[in-house]
Image (cartoon, helix red, strand yellow):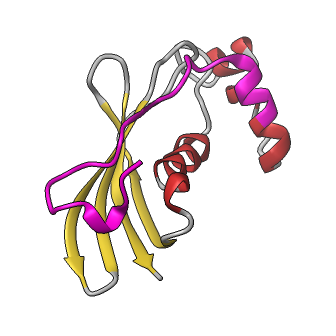
Amino acid sequence: MSTLAALQVGESVKEIQLAPVSRMDLIKYSGASGDFNPIHTIDDEAIKAGLPGIIAHGMWTMGNLAKLFTAYYEEGFVQDYSIRFKGMVFLGDVITLIATLKERQDRNLRFTVQAVNQHGKDVLIGEVLYHQY
């Protein structure tokens, strides 16, 4: 495993591809987060809300982005995190997580991050400020 210290501007950490989103993922996340909105777990409720089907919690997608940095916990920590939701994540979607080094300043590394579905569409974009020890 390489270190973030060796990463150059424009390079990315290893992408992570999540398993297809399952109903069980969203049921578990509902319990962990306390977000029991039925559009995330019940087909009929999602359809009644005008959606084509169940959608993943936006925060489920955002939380998964942190996986890009867990391999580097001995080097530092995520100091700041800002994201923007760009699209919905549906059951069966395969999400790829990407982080590219945008800027290096002293011990602070600024990354652009994105979550992309299997169709190549961004469902989330943002920035992460990672502080090295």
Could you tell me if residue 14 is visible in this image? yes
* Magenta-colored span: 1-28
Does residue 78 sit above or below 118 in this rendering? below
Relative image position of residue 27 (x, y in whole percent): 79, 28
| Nearest the eye: 5 or 114 | 5
The residue lying at 37 percent from left, 60 percent from top is: 3
Principal SS element in the magenta part? loop
Left or right of 90 on screen, residue 48: right
Q: In the shown orientation, is residue 103 left or right of residue 47?
A: left
**76 in relation to 120, above or below:** below
Query: Foreground: 5 or 32?
Result: 5
Residue, x 30% and y 17% (percent of image)? Answer: 119
Q: Is residue 95 left or right of residue 47?
A: left
What is the x, y in percent for residue 74? 55, 68
Q: Position of residue 23 (x, y in %)?
A: 71, 18
For the point 31% across and 68% down, the residue is 5
Asked if residue 104 is among those painted magenta in the image, a careful observer would answer no
Q: Residue 41 versus residue 60: which sits nearer the camera?
A: 60
Residue lying furthest front in this view? 1
Residue with the most extreme bottom position: 106
Residue 16: in magenta span: yes
38 lies above or below 125: above
In this orientation, does residue 41 appear? no
Q: Position of residue 99 (x, y in %)?
A: 32, 50
